[in-house]
Image: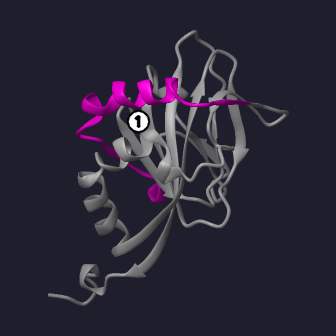
């Protein structure tokens, strides 16, 4: 399963980081705490469609290089981002094991990440082991939505901020498949 999880370093991260953080500061946020997770701030339950939230256009407009890699990786030219949300984790916050239903692909963009040990942890159900990628702030981790994953408990005082999205692949681009081509 580890080979199905990949990451992309966003070229425009330094350009958009503060704009995104300012945008989050200026919007309505909820706290989401239950027996499965503790997330200090999120807009996951916001009824406003993600494409109308202030940070979405900042994020999406910075993804040209990512979208090019994404299309090649999945041999597609047509996909739909059908929801995005942000989460801010503070000391003692976490998000327990879960997967995303009704979608093909999920991503996590690390806006603030001071230590790779705070990055998303994945569970390989074939090898029966956990793994994390060697990522840093500004990276986007992409993975099939059925892979169990979690955000480990934050044990320091530094905040972790992410944007997560779910994406459905719509159509295969046969021109991007190299099987049998010489």
Q: Is residue 72 visible?
A: yes
Q: Quadrant of residue 85?
A: top right
- Asked which colour scheme the image uses, the reply is one colour
Left or right, 91 with respect to 68, comes to right
Residue found at x 49% / y 40%: 163
Could you classify mark 1 by the number of other residues whose Cα lies within 10 Å: few (under 14), some (14-19), or many (20 or more)?
A: few
| Residue receiving disc 1 | 134
Residue 21: say if magenta: yes
101 relative to 116, above or below: below
User: Whole-percent x and y of residue 61?
Assistant: 30, 49
Foreground residue, 20 or 125? 20
The structure residue drawn at horizontal position 31% and vertical position 33%, both measured from the top left corner, is 16
In which quarter of the view is residue 68 placed?
bottom left
Residue sitting nearer the eye, 126 or 59: 59
- Name the spot of residue 84 as percent of width and height, x first: 53, 49
Q: Is residue 139 magenta?
A: no
Q: Residue at x 67, y 56 (%)?
A: 125
Q: Which residues are magenta?
A: 2-31
Left or right: 67 in relation to 146? left
142 or 165: which is nearer to us?
165
Closest to the observer: 179 or 95? 95
Reply above or below: 84 against 9: below
Quadrant in the picture for residue 179:
bottom left
| Residue 107 visible to an observer of this rendering | no
Looking at the image, which residue sits at the far bottom? 180
Residue in the picture at 65% in, 43% down: 46
């Amino acid at each position: 399963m580890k080979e199905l999880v990949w990451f992309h370093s966003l070229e425009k991260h330094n350009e958009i980081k503060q704009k995104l953080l300012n945008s989050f500061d200026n919007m309505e946020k909820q706290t989401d705490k239950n027996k499965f997770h503790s997330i200090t701030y999120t807009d996951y339950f916001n009824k406003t469609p993600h494409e109308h939230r202030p940070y979405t256009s900042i994020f999406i407009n910075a993804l040209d290089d990512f979208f090019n890699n994404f299309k090649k990786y999945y041999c597609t030219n047509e996909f739909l981002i059908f929801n995005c949300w942000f989460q801010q984790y503070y000391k003692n916050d976490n998000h327990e094991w879960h997967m995303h239903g009704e979608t093909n692909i999920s991503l996590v963009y690390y806006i603030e990440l001071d230590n790779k040990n705070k990055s998303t942890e994945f569970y390989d159900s074939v090898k029966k082991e956990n793994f994390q990628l060697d990522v840093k702030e500004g990276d986007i981790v992409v993975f099939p939505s059925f892979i169990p994953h979690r955000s480990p408990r934050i044990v320091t005082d530094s905040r972790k901020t992410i944007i997560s999205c779910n994406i459905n692949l719509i159509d295969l681009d046969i021109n991007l498949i190299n099987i049998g081509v010489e």
